[in-house]
Image (cartoon, coloured by chain):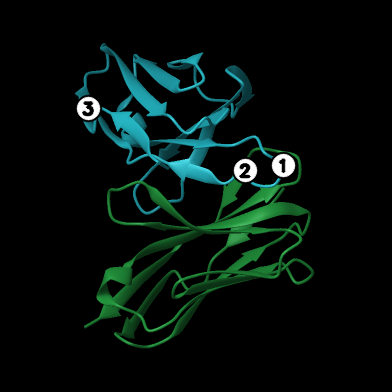
Chain colours: A green, B cyan
Amino acid sequence: KQEVTQIPAALSVPEGENLVLNCSFTDSAIYNLQWFRQDPGKGLTSLLLIQSSQREQTSGRLNASLDKSSGRSTLYIAASQPGDSATYLCAARRGGNEKLTFGTGTRLTIIP
Amino acid sequence: DTEVTQTPKHLVMGMTNKKSLKCEQHMGHRAMYWYKQKAKKPPELMFVYSYEKLSINESVPSRFSPECPNSSLLNLHLHALQPEDSALYLCASSQRDLSSYEQYFGPGTRLTVT
């Protein structure tokens, strides 16, 4: 059974700093991995999706990497802004299956 | 347009009520999903519809009844719910394209069972 873990559960950093969020998964047979952000009481916003054959994806100030062999993905946020404050969730999809397994989330606070 | 809409935004219902949640997408996606999310927890998958047919039921109690009338619309019918069913209910959709399966989520319905 796939288990996805995100450490730390909460992170506070000053505005302007670069930061990395971590995601670990136990079953390396994933089809793809998706990063989301969620604002309090809101739905999930898709940030980046990495296919199993890719090593990284970039969108603006965000860069996500994937290392299947070590069971890890990271989300790098450059030049953080207060508007980046949210909970960040990673989710792994098993090959040929439509089910996403979500991580436990990292609650990020950017301090102005 | 990458929008998934959900109605209502908030719903308060008694344990004897019958209500329905509605989800709609116009992206041509052929897979649609219902998730339940409790506070400070990740979403938990409830149901998956693929080409309007139920493909995954994660052992959800029968008081939750999904329906997919067409490829754009997904309903969740609620009956005889319990207070512990209070949660944020999220709908999502995705292509059934082998190169993607990227899921797009709606804003959710905040359900309170009294």
Type of residue at label 3? Leu
Q: Which residue is identified by label 1?
A: B98
**Sequence-wise first label, 3 or 2:** 3
Q: Which quarter of the figure has residue A80?
A: bottom left
B3 or B31: nearer the eye? B3
Q: Is residue B114 visible?
A: no
Above or below, A62 relative to B99: below
Which residue lies at the image location 44% right of the left edge and 75% below the top edge? A61
Q: In this view, does A82 lie above or below B27?
A: below
Mark 2 chain: B
Question: Which quadrant: the C terminus of chain A?
Answer: bottom left
Amino acid tagged 1:
Leu
Cα distance, mark 2 to mark 1?
7 Å
Please rate how many residues cluster around mark 3, counting C-alpha atoms within 10 Å: few if below 14, some from 14 to 19, many from 20. Answer: some
Q: What element carries label 3?
A: strand
Is residue B56 in sight in this rendering? yes
At x 22%, y 27%, the residue is B11
Q: How far apart are labels 1 and 3 at the CA level? A: 36 Å
Q: How many marks?
A: 3
Given the image, on which type of amino acid does mark 2 rest?
Tyr
Chain letter behind tag 1: B
